Amino acid sequence: MEIKKVSLPEEKRKTKIADESQLGFGKIFTDRMLMVEWKSGKGCRCPD
């Protein structure tokens, strides 16, 4: 399995939120997800 990081061009990026209390954890959701298997003693495995 090959994992590649692809960055969004600078002109298409949104500005970073200066006040981290405004991030909206648990309130804002996305259709993007990374699943990584983790086992005690072995740690992280290949992502799906």
Image (cartoon, grey):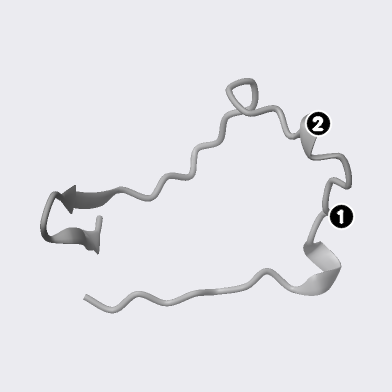
* Residue at the image point whose x is 49% and y is 74% from the top: 5
Q: Is residue 29 above or below residue 40?
A: above
Q: Residue furthest top?
A: 27
Q: Is mark 2 in CB contact (under 8 Å) with mark 1?
A: no
Give the structural element (helix, strand or loop) at label 1: loop
Q: Nearer the viewer, residue 11 or 27?
A: 27
Residue 14 % position (x, y): 82, 54
Give the structural element (helix, strand or loop) at label 2: helix
Residue 48 % position (x, y): 25, 55
Q: Which mark is residue 15?
A: 1
The total of numbered circles placed on residues is 2
Q: Is residue 26 above or below residue 19?
A: above
Residue type of the residue flagged with mark 1: Thr
* Residue at the image point whose x is 48% and y is 44% from the top: 32
> Would residue 7 appear left or right of 15 to someone viewing this image?
left
Residue 37 % position (x, y): 20, 51
> Would residue 8 appear left or right of 34 to someone viewing this image?
right
Question: Quadrant of the image for the N terminus?
Answer: bottom left
Q: Using the rendered view, name the quadrant where residue 6 is placed.
A: bottom right
Q: Residue furthest front?
A: 41
Residue 10 % position (x, y): 80, 72
* Residue at the image point whose x is 57% and y is 29% from the top: 29
Q: Is residue 38 above or below residue 46?
A: above
Mark 2 sits on what residue? 22
Q: Which mark is residue 47?
A: none
Q: Is residue 21 above or below residue 19?
A: above
Q: CA distance from mark 2 to mark 1?
A: 13 Å
**Which sits earlier in the primary sequence, circle 2 or circle 1?**
1
* Residue at the image point whose x is 20% and y is 59% from the top: 43
Label 1: how many residues lie within 10 Å, few (<14), some (14-19) or many (20+)?
A: few
> Would residue 30 appear left or right of 11 to someone viewing this image?
left
Residue type of the residue flagged with mark 2: Gln
